[in-house]
Amino acid sequence: MKALGLLFTCLFVASAASSFAADPEGKHKAVKATEDFYAAVDAGEWDKAEKLTVPKRYPREKLQKMKDSLRLDQAKVREAYIGKEQSAIVTDEIAPREEGKGRKGRWGVSLRLVDGNWLIRDFDFLPDKEAVEKYLKGFRKVEPNARKAVGE
């Protein structure tokens, strides 16, 4: 009986280790969706990017404009707050693609859980610390029990 218990324990530990290895950073799906979205737009993979957004919210023209105007390779997740049905992501500062053609700023990415998938619903430009605080305060009103998944 002890041998059987030991066998199940070993199988559980091995299973947990293999699932952790599949995602070595243990990123939440909302964080991964955000990173995958920015990478897809930066690479011009429009179909992939569109699948990561709420349907019909960001057509190719808007995605192309985003790619043309921003240095999306700089879009790194700095903070992430995960709620029951909505999540808020704040990026590091992203610069305009061309100097003098826009401002540097962080982005607030709002995601919604749709049929088990985290999809991007909206983007908010956050030019300074106060804007970030206001964005997160608004999010906390909607998802007061959200947990921090990534952050400083």
Image (cartoon, helix red, strand yellow):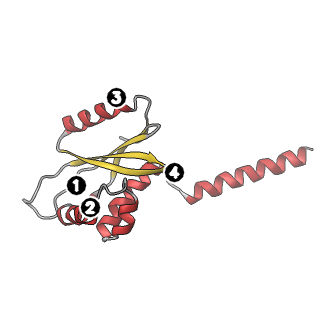
Mark 2 and 1 residues: CB-CB less than 8 Å, in contact?
A: yes
Q: Which mark is residue 116?
A: none
What is the spatial separation of the Cα atoms under label 3 and label 4, in whole angstroms? Answer: 27 Å
Closest to the observer, 42 or 128: 42
Query: Which residue bears the numbered disc 4?
Result: 26
Q: Nearer the viewer, mark 1 or mark 3?
A: 3
Image coordinates of residue 74 in percent, x first then y, are 27, 59
Task: Report the side of 119 relative to 72 (left or right).
Answer: right
Q: Earlier in the sequence, mark 2 or mark 1?
A: 2
Amino acid type, label 4: Gly
Q: Nearer the viewer, mark 3 or mark 4?
A: 3
Query: Which residue bears the numbered disc 2?
Result: 72
Q: Residue at x 25, y 34 (%)?
A: 133
Closest to the observer, 105 or 43: 43
Task: Report the side of 30 relative to 116 (left or right).
Answer: left
Residue lying farthest to the front in this orientation: 56
What is the spatial separation of the Cα atoms under label 3 and label 2, in whole angstroms? Answer: 29 Å
Query: Which residue bears the numbered disc 1?
Result: 94
Residue lying farthest to the right in this orientation: 1
What is the spatial separation of the Cα atoms under label 2 and label 1, in whole angstroms? Answer: 7 Å
Q: Which mark is residue 141?
A: 3
Q: Earlier in the sequence, mark 3 or mark 2?
A: 2
Image coordinates of residue 130 in percent, x first then y, are 19, 34
Q: Residue at x 50, y 49 (%)?
A: 115
Q: Earlier in the sequence, mark 1 or mark 3?
A: 1
Instruction: Identify the secondary structure beneath mark 1.
Output: loop
Q: Residue at x 30, y 35 (%)?
A: 136
Amino acid type, label 1: Ile
Mark 3 and 2 residues: CB-CB less than 8 Å, in contact?
A: no
Amino acid type, label 2: Leu
Q: Earlier in the sequence, mark 4 or mark 1?
A: 4
Mark 1 and 3 residues: CB-CB less than 8 Å, in contact?
A: no
